[in-house]
Image (spheres, rainbow, N blue to C red):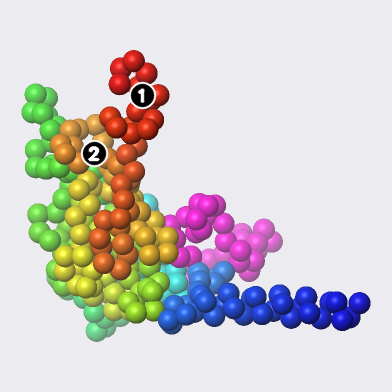
Amino acid sequence: MRRVLLPSVLAIVLMAVSAHLIARQGGVKPFTDGDWPRFAGDFAGTKYSKLTQINTTNVSRLAPAWSFEGVGTQQTPIVVSGVLYATTPTGAVALDADTGMLIWRYGTAPAPGGGRGGRGRGGAGPGAPGGGRGQVPVNADAPQDGEPAPAARGAGPAAGAGAGGGRGPAPPTAAGPGGAPSSRGLAYWPGDGTIAARILMTVGQRLVALKAASGELDTTFGNGGFIEMGVAWGGVPLVYKNIVVVGSNNGEVTQGPSPGDTKAFDARTGAKLWTFASVAQPGDPNHAKSWLDEG
């Protein structure tokens, strides 16, 4: 019995070690149960954590450990290796998840109370990058997350909306994103062993990449750190392996030549990989079945 059992145990151990080594190949660290690497936690969107320290017996005794001003109530931050990442109305931040201290900031610090509903005291310490000065007010009543503003009666498509609406007037630079990022959150790409980890966020029609370690605009991605998606997307990008998937906020206004389809881009280069047409078009295999005699 032992002779049969021992090879089986060794095989299982070797498989586990191999899987771990493959995951770490090229220096890419695998996620752990202590991480929250995606907006919804996992690819199934369960929003479930495997951690057990907080449970039904002690949840009523929880007390605030720290707070950080400028991150809105719609936000679902992500946490990787003890670092919390989130967007602000003027950029993005990385915080020490244990203490709330600012590690880096991309963009200027929003004015107090300008976090789209976010409250609490700032966690920025003296000398923190980008912290404290150059604060700018945020118009909380402006259209959020790249959604096109409603068109006036008889005015046709929303003025200034272009192909997708909500696109910032200035491109992202080292100083800031050139517009308001999605208030829902951002995404984390762990890198591929050659390219270091990136933070990916949507700013109107643009997908912007930052260096996860420093918060600097990663100019090796796309067109100097960003790409044009064609239509604004106010949600959070979904990262699968080296693929970044985004939706669209086309609302009920004309989008011109850029329909509100789901798109995928290469997380390494920013190159467009594919588009999924949510409404069957002429030439698609299911077009006739979708529209019957009106196709």
Task: Say above or below: 164 vs 100.
Answer: above
The span from disc 2 to disc 1 (Cα, nearest Å) is: 20 Å
Percent coordinates x, y for residue 276 in the rendering: 34, 43
Asked if residue 63 is among those painted magenta in the image, a careful observer would answer: yes
In the image, is 161 to the left or to the right of 53? left
Percent coordinates x, y for residue 158 in the rendering: 13, 36
| Residue located 30% across and 55% down the image | 273
Quarter of the picture holding the C terminus: top left
Disc nearest the viewer among 2 and 1: 1
Residue 42 appearing in the image:
yes
Q: Nearer the viewer, residue 212 or 273?
A: 273
Q: Which mark is residue 90?
A: none
Q: Which mark is residue 259?
A: 2
The amino acid type, in three-letter code, at marker 2 is: Pro
Q: Nearer the viewer, residue 243 or 135?
A: 243
Within 10 Å of disc 1 (Cα), the crowding (few <14, some 14-19, many 20+) is: some
Asked if residue 286 is among those painted magenta in the image, a careful observer would answer: no
**Residue under circle 1?**
288
| Residue located 69% across and 79% down the image | 13
Percent coordinates x, y for residue 62 in the rendering: 57, 64
Task: Say above or below: 224 vs 147.
Answer: below
- CB contact under 8 Å: marks 2 and 1: no
Task: Say above or below: 251 vs 111.
Answer: above
Count of marks placed on residues = 2
Identify the residue at the far bottom of this view. Answer: 127
In the image, is 174 to the left or to the right of 260? left
| Residue located 53% across and 52% down the image | 44
